[in-house]
Image (tube, rainbow, N blue to C red):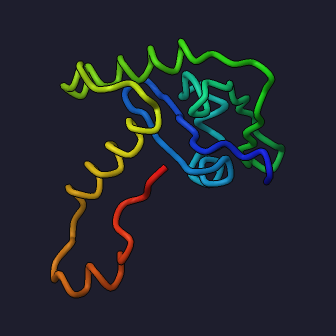
Amino acid sequence: MSNDPRLVFLFDDSEVHIFQSLAAAEGWMEAADVVDGEYIAALTDTGQVIRMTTTANHEVVLELTDETNPTKLRQLLRQHSAEAGQPDTDLDPIDFANRAWQLEWDTRWPKWPRWLDKRLHPHGPPQA
């Protein structure tokens, strides 16, 4: 998709989920959660609003809208950072995503033995 955003931020009541494409986010989401209103917002790294819908076949569809709301993105990132115990986190969405992925990478399990970890994950954590 040529107009695919660099990052997709998906917010629910307690977490932020970060994806590198609309397709990755669609594949991870469940239609029942979209229908039930579990997600409070879906935004790109520039604050572009993403519409969340489902099909009759229970597939999630994410569509970029013409609306942008970078203030809401920063507000939600700030709120998530405070809840995670990092209220002074830089709110640049790209840096936020890279730090979140690095933290997830550092705490993943299993990551031993080292030779196998390096073979399975030669490039390290994702980067925006």
Left or right: residue 5 versus residue 109 is right
Left or right: residue 5 versus residue 97 is right
Task: Give the image quarter of residue 41.
Answer: top right
Residue positioned 21% across, 87% down in the render: 115
Numbered marks: total = 0
Percent position of residue 114, x then y: 17, 81
Residue positioned 30% across, 51% down in the render: 102
Percent position of residue 7, x then y: 57, 42
**Is 23 situated above or below 112?**
above
- Residue lying farthest right? 56
Percent position of residue 109, x then y: 22, 65
In the image, 37 versus 1, the foreground residue is: 1
In the picture, the quarter occupied by the N terminus is bottom right
Left or right: residue 52 versus residue 107 is right
Percent position of residue 64, x then y: 76, 33
Residue positioned 58% across, 46% down in the render: 29
**Is 64 situated above or below 27?**
above
**Is 60 situated above or below 89?**
below
**Is 97 situated above or below 101?**
above
Task: Give the image quarter of residue 96.
Answer: top left
Left or right: residue 80 versus residue 54 is left
Residue positioned 41% across, 23% down in the render: 77
